[in-house]
Amino acid sequence: MPERRTPAGGPAAPHAPFFRLGLLMLALSGLWWCLVLLARWQGRALPWAVSPGLAHGLLFGLGAMPQFITGFFFTAGPRWLRVPGPQTQALHLPLGLAGLGGLLILLGLHAAAPLAGLGLMLLMLAWAASWRLARRMLVASKEPDRLHLSGVHGAWLLGLCGMALTGASLMAGREDWARASLQAVLWWSLLPVFLIALHRMVPMFAEPAVWLQAAGRLPASERTLLWAGLAGCAWGGAWQVLGPSFMPPWAWALRAGLEGGVALLLLKQAWHWRHMARLPLMAMMLCGGLWLALGAGLSALSAGLLALGRPGLGLAPLHAVLAGGLASLMMAQVSRVSSAHAGRPLAVDRPLMALFLLLQLAVLLRLWAALGPSEPTGALALAALLWALCMSGWALRLRGWLRRGRAV
């Protein structure tokens, strides 16, 4: 009997249009930042309405990630909650608003900060419309264990609040408020979502027999790991939002101890799952977890140095967590969903693994630049070029998978 497929944008594959939009934004933001750094390297000044560091965080953090989270929830949610997914007609509004919002943000970063704020507000409204659809699924579900998707939904709501504050701050001309609220979105929304997804997905592949026997209910020890990771996100976000420059030495020492403990906990769990590294998809996820552990360890080391009155490690811990950990998990999880719905037996083939290794090289180069005595513009530009090549290649690689639809 010939294989039948549902359209890639239909109800059976609601992730596809969101993933396509997210990949487009990710590729464009990578190429944009690469051009920005190349211009800086050559001594050319670009017009800025928003400071370059904040602009970089806004476009990389809020441009694509919400689309991937939406697509993931609309695909995993119906299976995990045992409820129907959203109808195609309900997806048009959030997709349209998100696309327009992303364009206005990119233009506003160089033309006018209020325009970027307006674009961010449109992105927030798009994400809010999707959040409302996700809430209907949670309310309709009778599944006894809704821990992970409820956690994603809650972090999603925190992200909406943070995006609204960030957009309003840009429209009011307050970059300090925008920077603080952006940190809140990163630490209290985006990072928890990917941690929760990692916590749910890895045991399903690493120990499927145990998972099925427990009917999807995790043991107490596994739940403790999840709560510890979320507590680390809450702590890191609070530290960034409150302003670390005003902290006394004893607070830095306390932070060093707490984040060192989080790093050891993450390493312990990665060691527990080490036997799954022979599978390419699991290796990608474990690599993302190791980046999170490294980021926590670097942050602990930086806090310890600051407690002793010495210079910290600058942006190295943040890039290890976000560019290393978050991006690696994003590539693994988005590729897994896309390949499964395209009917592919393998989520990770050789071209995709090559792109993943290119991502690791870009992050390592960025960390080397951050840990040096002064951040060399040439190394930053090269890291941005590798990142742009990786994300553009990934978008092209998944393009065919997302167009094929799901085998039924």
Image (cartoon, rainbow, N blue to C red):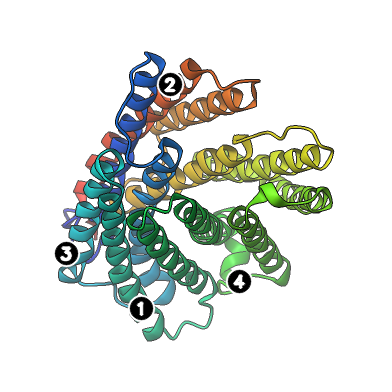
Q: Secondary structure at mark 4?
A: helix
Quote the CA–CA distance across marks 2 and 4.
50 Å
Give the residue at the far top of this rendering: 42
Judged from the image, the secondary structure of the residue bearing numbered disc 1 is helix
- Disc 4 target residue: 213
Q: Earlier in the sequence, mark 4 or mark 1?
A: 1
Q: Earlier in the sequence, mark 2 or mark 1?
A: 1
Tags 4 and 3 touching, CB below 8 Å: no
| Residues packed near mark 4 inside 10 Å, few (<14), some (14 to 19) or many (20 plus) | few
In the rendered view, does 289 fall on the left or right side of 77?
A: right
User: Can the viewer see residue 112?
Assistant: yes
On the picture, is 71 further left or further right than 190?
Answer: left
The residue identified by callout 1 is 137
Q: Label 3 is placed on what type of residue? A: His
User: Residue 366 location, x and y as percent?
Assistant: 54, 27
Q: What kind of residue is marked 2?
A: Ala
Q: Nearer the viewer, mark 4 or mark 1?
A: 1
Q: Out of 21 and 127, give the one closest to the viewer.
A: 127
Q: Residue at x 29, y 76 (%)?
A: 84
The label on residue 92 is 3
Label 2 packing within 10 angstroms: few (<14), some (14-19), many (20+): many
Name the secondary structure under disc 2. Answer: helix
Is 314 situated above or below 233?
Answer: above
Sequence-first tag of 1 and 3: 3
As drawn, 356 above or below 185: above
Residue linked to disc 2: 381
Q: CA distance from mark 3 to mark 2?
A: 37 Å
Give the tally of numbered discs.
4
Q: Position of residue 373 (x, y in %)?
A: 65, 20
